[in-house]
Amino acid sequence: MRSHLPVVVLLGASVLWGLTWLPLKQINSMGIDGIALTMGAYGILALLLTPVLMAQFSQWREHKRAMGMILLFGGGANLAFTYALINGEVIRVMVLFYLLPVWGVLGGKFFLREGVDLWRWLGAALAVTGAFVILGGFDALSGAPSWIDLIALLSGLLFAMNNLVFRAAAAVPVASKITVMFYGCLILAGALLGLGVEQLPYDAAPEAWFALAAYALLWLLLANIGSQWGVTHMEAGRSSIIIIMELITAVISATLIAGERMDAMEMIGGVLILAAALIEALRTKEDDLPETTI
């Protein structure tokens, strides 16, 4: 059983991520909008893990540039992803978010000087084609995509950039990088609220804030710990395949619970993106280490 524990933990965490739209939309319906919800949930986790960040200061103080990039990319990715899930169609947001193979290939090649083989280029091409189909094909060229589509795409791009920095800053403890990412969510969301993009939910009921705290401390914390622990205790390729369960869980749950449907073209686009994610997962090797460190 012990040898299977990382698989079970990562699978459970992936299912939690795939179902995270449920508590997010429920809390939102109780009167807390996306930006404030993000600031509250990730702010709680940031404060909770601050002692860990301080205890590991000596291990990351020489990597302030990397930590700043994680704060920006990681914080922005989680903020954009949460906002898009709350305000958009779950399936569409999740599928567009999973354009990760494209951003991973381009970022790895141009920022980390990684080699890109034929399979990775094929995965990137499939992902781009799938997104093109989902966004409307050539009809999309006649008008701008929806702002939720753009935010979903942005969340995937920022998440991929954050992953690149995570890998390049290998000397920094994972706990410190995660905590800084949480602080990024808190700071960016707070800045947007300060600029008046959304109003603070002053009239939200106490039950809504209790639900937000429970989501942060039970759901979000478990999902993050499970993902990181599982990934660090198994081969990279194997973990990448299991993580795709996030997308599958989101699609199935949104179909069964929220009644969402994809038309034929959207389904074709989704299959192409899923194929791209599988190609990226299957060709991932344990020795895929960057030449550059930051």
Image (tube, rainbow, N blue to C red):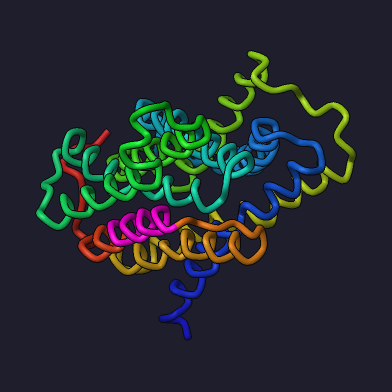
Quarter in which the C terminus is drawn: top left
Between residues 292 and 247, which one lies in front from this camera angle?
Answer: 247
Question: At 56% across and 39% down in the image, what residue appears?
Answer: 84
Compared with 173, 18 (above or below) is below
Q: Is residue 186 left or right of residue 160?
A: right
Between residues 242 and 164, which one lies in front from this camera angle?
Answer: 242
Quarter of the view holding residue 159:
top left
Question: At 55% across and 35% down in the image, what residue appears?
Answer: 79
Q: Is residue 257 left or right of residue 114?
A: right
Quarter of the view holding residue 37:
top right
Q: Is residue 148 left or right of residue 47?
A: left
Question: At 28% across and 65% down in the image, what residue appears?
Answer: 237
Question: At 80% across and 29% down in the image, what residue appears?
Answer: 201
Compared with 233, 217 (above or below) is above
Q: Which residues are magenta?
A: 264-276
* Residue 204, image x, y percentages: 85, 34
Quarter of the view holding residue 105:
top left
* Residue 184, image x, y percentages: 53, 31
- Residue placed furthest toward the bottom: 1
